[in-house]
Amino acid sequence: MTTNLSTDHSQAKLATDDPALNQQVVGTSRGDRESSFDLADFPVPNGTEEDWRFTPIKELAPFFADKLEGTLPEVTAEGVELEVVDRDDERIGTIQAPGDRSAVVAWNSFEKAYVVTVAEGAETEGIVKVKGQGGDPSSLHFHFVAETNSNSTIVVAHDGDAMLSEAIEIDVKDGAHLTFVTVQEWEEDSIHLSNNRIRLGKDASIRHIVVTLGGKIVRVTTDGEYAGTGGDMELLGAYYTDAGQHQEHRLFVKHGVPDCRSNATYKGALQGNDAHAVWIGDVLIEVEATGTDTYELNRNLVLTEGAKADSVPNLEIKTGEIEGAGHASATGRFDDEQLFYLQARGIPEDVARRLVVRGFFASLINQIGVPSIQEKLMAAIEVELDQTMAGVEA
């Protein structure tokens, strides 16, 4: 059995006071990468760039054009008010600038944006549904605001058939607590590029959850920054990559103020020929960010031959005055020894395989804290396991 268990070397970098030595040790800082609203700042990528080297770039060519003018998905909401505003609304474009060409093209392409606001001190649960209508590539722009001392849960659920480039701005004000879930459950030929940009206020917290279950190519980038001390950012992700699918999740957390925390945990299972999962986790701790506590973890479980996972955690530290910083990454095949152990105790093979995969995802699912999403993910895992078992029995 030949299975590609590719895992890139992780990088831990510590800056020094000597500029020459610092260049040797650190190289190009993640914080120095371009971010801009100007398309001219981002040439069309060719696949050799660090941000694009794992991505099937040729299939994304339409997303690098000057403008996207295809059929827009249908957007509806339940439990929250969906405000439709012009692109010149003062709130739009205030949470960081785009970090790659596709994100700038998306910025140039939308005419109306969707805004969801959770009022100060309010407790809210709501869902925004994005239903793809097929057609040529299009662009959506969302802006979510959790006002001071609010406590809310918002789910953005994607399904249907789409060629979509999307920006999601998330502004969590001082003392607010937001659970934000984005679910990708696209039809098999869909392509989805999503850029999530988070700003976290003083003593605010966010649990940001990405669940990717469908689509031909799905690339979700999540960029987080802190606007005040005491911020707590929990970044969780679960994905199940099938034959021919490319699922890519990229994180960048910038610690630029003192006494903030971030924790990232992403887990994925892969099965089938040319199933490809990519996870990139970048954390930057600036000189000013004393007291930072950060950790990131990625685990991949390869269930069949022909699947490939790339996992790259990067940690750049510019101050020694931190609480803690670390990362871990591992990609491995289905554990035949564990399977044998269970079968030796009278558990049938199909049941044993299901137990192993459920156990792999269990700790992550328990962290999600949104029952409807937990149930959806468990149901999706069962469907995928049915496919896996059909292949084993064949």
Image (tube, rainbow, N blue to C red):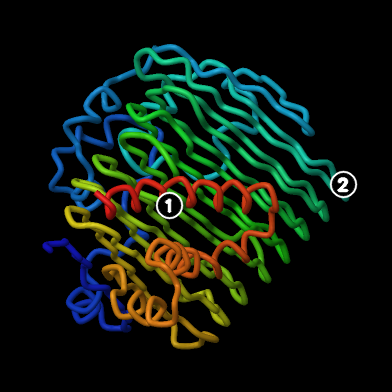
Q: Please state which of the two labelled residues, at mark 2 or mark 1, is closer to the viewer.
A: 1
SS for dot 1 = strand
SS for dot 2 = loop
Q: Which amino acid does label 2 sit on?
A: Ala
Image quarter in which the N terminus is found:
bottom left
Residue drawn at point x = 30 percent, y = 20 percent: 66
Q: How far apart are marks 2 and 1 (CA)?
A: 32 Å
Q: Earlier in the sequence, mark 2 or mark 1?
A: 2
- Pick whichever, 69 or 134, lies toward us: 134
Residue drawn at point x = 59 percent, y = 61 percent: 226
Name which quarter of the figure residue 307 lies in. bottom left
Asked whether residue 276 appears in the rendered view, the answer is: no
Asked whether residue 125 appears in the rendered view, the answer is: yes
Q: Is residue 116 left or right of residue 196?
A: right
* Mark 1 neighbour density, 10 Å: few (under 14) some (14–19) many (20 or more): many
Residue drawn at point x = 33 percent, y = 69 percent: 314
Residue drawn at point x = 70 percent, y = 53 percent: 371
Image coordinates for residue 382, horizontal then vertical, percent: 49, 51
Q: Is residue 71 left or right of residue 329?
A: right
Q: Name the residue under label 1.
A: 239
Image coordinates for residue 353, horizontal then vertical, percent: 39, 65
Residue 83 shows which numbered tag?
A: none
Q: How many labels does the image show?
A: 2
Residue 122 shows which numbered tag?
A: 2
